[in-house]
Amino acid sequence: MNNKTDSLNSSMSISSADEGLKKIAIITEIRTKIQEVKDLPTLPSIAFEVLKVAGKPNSSTNDLARVMEVDVALTGKILRTANSAYYGVPRKIDSLRMALVVMGMDEISNLVTTASILKAFPDDSGSDDWDPKYFWFHSAAVAELTVGLYDVLNLPKSTGAYVAGILHDVGQLMLHQYFNKYRVACTDYSKKEDVPSFRAELELLGVDHGHIGAWLIQRWNLPEEISIAVAQHHIRPADAPQYGLATVIDFADRLFHKMYNRAPEKVIEELREDKEWREWVGSRASTTATLVQELNGRIERATRLLDIMK
């Protein structure tokens, strides 16, 4: 009996060791490609400069205009967007400086970021289980909801909130474009075991899409705050700040899935019954109904903005 038990334990140990080595090999493969391969997407230098200027508290609209004016194509896209029905500005905006005054540095910075990120990734016709249009809509909506949560909860806004929000799932895109066999296996596992995608990734690959996305963001040399938030938006250390950027993105992501294509009344009811949500929000929001109404507008905003920017 003891010999059989010892034999079973031994085989289990070998199996666990093999699984561990397999995951290490997968992690190494993914990380090496993201760090070293030359054909990975790159952000235009203008995006870095805009983020740098917008992140400085003493920057002016003139500072941002000087950075952006060197990119004529991008400036033209921003002006077309500013003059679209999306913003409903009563008079024509005919200069970048006017756009900055009317719309504000944060809004222009977010537009530049969105345009730059969309440009960085090639058009993808998709596959049976991958919808690029939905992916970017979800990404933009979570970015809007992240910024919206800072507003409605009266939190000190992080300068990287929008960027981290729109990039929070970029690791999934990396898996789709460069390691699709792993993404498909994780998708199948997620459906079969009824677990979230990041749990399936951890189980099969040893790393989730948050960390994979963070590796790309680190390669781009974006601020550390953004890479940390993306890495930790599903799994965070126990001492993570209650209203840190990673946590806000996590709740924005969850809110999107509760709110998308659902009646506001149903969303309000579910949020009122969600203990974790209630404890996190506390008394910061005026009412759940008001919060849902304001954030619903953010999701609609993402839809219309992508239609213009694409």
Image (cartoon, rainbow, N blue to C red):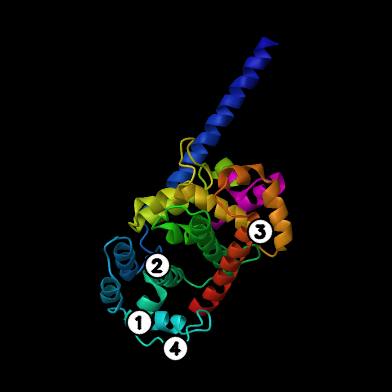
The residue at which mark 3 appears reads as 289
Q: Whole-Å distance between the Cαs marked 2 and 1?
A: 14 Å
Which amino acid type is marked by label 4? Arg
- Per the model, the C-alpha gap separating discs 3 and 4 is 34 Å
User: Residue at horizontal 45%, vertical 47%?
Assistant: 244
Find numbered disc 1 in the image and state the secondary structure of the residue it sits on.
helix
Q: Which residue is mark 1?
A: 98
For marks 1 and 3, the one nearer the N-term is 1
Spot occupied by residue 112 in the image (x, y as percentages of width and height): 39, 71
- Compared to residue 278, the image places residue 176 above or below, namely below
Locate the N terminus and report the quarter of the image it occupies: top right
Q: Residue at x 52, y 63 (%)?
A: 144
Indicate the quadrant where residue 74 lies: bottom left
The residue labelled by disc 2 is 106
Type of secondary structure dominating the magenta stretch: helix
Closer-to-camera residue (226/300): 300
Q: Nearer the viewer, mark 2 or mark 4?
A: 4
Numbered disc 2: secondary structure: helix
